[in-house]
Image (tube, rainbow, N blue to C red):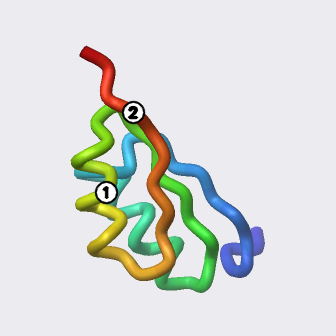
Amino acid sequence: MNTTNNTVLITGGSAGIGFEVARQFAARGNKVIIAGRNAERLQKAASQILGVTAIGRCYE
């Protein structure tokens, strides 16, 4: 399996296992998109990992 130069979508990427998976894929040169329910947490997570894009919105 090729684990570099891909575009990877990770749901629940703002914390825990999802965040770590996003970090690992980004470190291998992939374009990583994280998604989730809390936009604020997503933006915070994306700012901690170079090359990660966050998409999502808050559901109340």
Q: Residues within 10 Å of mark 1 (few under 14, many from 20)?
A: some
Quarter of the picture containing the N terminus is bottom right
Q: Quadrant of residue 6?
A: bottom right
Side of 39 relative to 24 (left or right):
left
Q: Are marks 1 and 2 in contact (CB under 8 Å)?
A: no
Q: Is residue 35 above or below residue 52?
A: above
- The mark total stands at 2
Q: Amino acid under label 2?
A: Arg
- Residue drawn 73% across and 79% down? 5
Q: Which SS class for mark 1?
A: helix
Residue 58 left/right relative to 31 = left
Q: Callout 2: helix, strand or loop? A: loop
Q: Quadrant of residue 46?
A: bottom left
Residue 41 is situated, as x and y percent measured from the top left of the image, at 23, 48
Determine the residue positioned at 50% across, 62% down: 53
Looking at the picture, tell me which residue is in the foreground, 11 or 51: 51
Q: Earlier in the sequence, mark 1 or mark 2?
A: 1
Q: Position of residue 45 (x, y in %)?
A: 28, 61
Where residue 43 is drawn, which disc sits there? 1
The three-letter code of the residue at mark 1 reads Gln
Residue 35 tag number: none
To which residue does mark 2 refer? 57
Is 34 displayed left or right of 31 in the figure?
A: left
